[in-house]
Image (tube, rainbow, N blue to C red):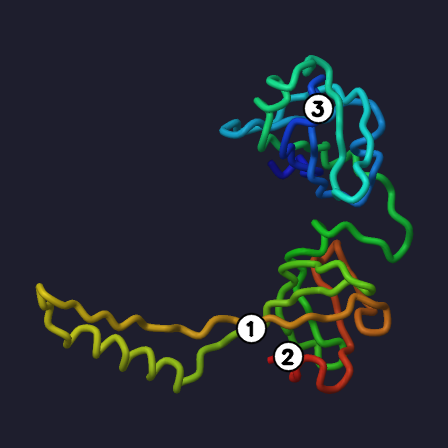
Amino acid sequence: MSDWIEIGKIVAAQGLDGEMRVYPNSDFPERFIEPGTRWLQKPGQNEPSPVELLGGRFIPGKGLYAIEMVGVETREQAEALRDSRLFIQYGARPHLDDNEFYVLDLIGLEVFNQDTQDMIGTVIDVIPAGNDLLEVQLNFTPTEEDLATDTERQAKLEKIPQNKRRKRHFQTKAKQPKTVLIPFVKDIVPVVDLENRRLEITPPQGLIESQT
């Protein structure tokens, strides 16, 4: 599926004449309005198949689009496509202006402190806001104390005899990597290097520490 980009999901029929409601996963309205070829993946299918979009319109107050496709002319046919996903081909993405990026390209980038060149973590999500926020999963290296604590928990678990009437369970709780939110603005993220799959940040003092 690396050759495809998901743009939306069919969530319901719209009316009686084959229109479908689509929950968008794209910032480009033309994906759901302009006629042309899209690709449709039904639940259980491994790959999408081409379909022809006749057109669409935005539904105010719903955050959804109503679309029409060739061959879908009744409510029953539209309902049969519920939970299907719509795609475009990866190469069909429109050109972006400077300092604009696709979310898909940002996820997975390694994050470095520009001053020290230490790796801080990895981008795992982009959260829309006034200024978009990069959600970064911080690097996590277990300390000796963490390892000792987990070993003690495991030892307790192994020493508890089974009791048919009552079973006690101790679960080891390994520490999970923490995440921080970093404003995606030029002053804080001056370098986005998609070719080398990395970005560099110059976080204000306390930005990362205050969230960990």
Identify which residue, 129 or 139, lies in the foreground.
Answer: 129
The correct choice, above or below, for 19 with respect to 176 in the image is above
21 vs 180, nearest the viewer = 21
**In percent of the image, x 75 and y 58: which residue is there?**
128
Q: Quadrant of residue 131?
A: bottom right
**Badge 2 is on which residue?**
211
Q: Residue at x 17, y 73 (%)?
A: 158
Q: Marks 3 and 2, Cα distance to the nearest angstrom?
A: 47 Å
Q: Which residue is mark 3?
A: 15
Furthest toward the right, the residue is 97
Q: Nearer the viewer, mark 3 or mark 1?
A: 3
Instruction: Check disc 2 and report its element: helix, strand or loop.
Output: helix
Q: Nearer the viewer, mark 3 or mark 2?
A: 3
- Measure how far apart labels 3 and 1 are at the Cα level: 46 Å
| Residue highlighted by disc 1 | 178
Q: Position of residue 23 (x, y in %)?
A: 69, 39
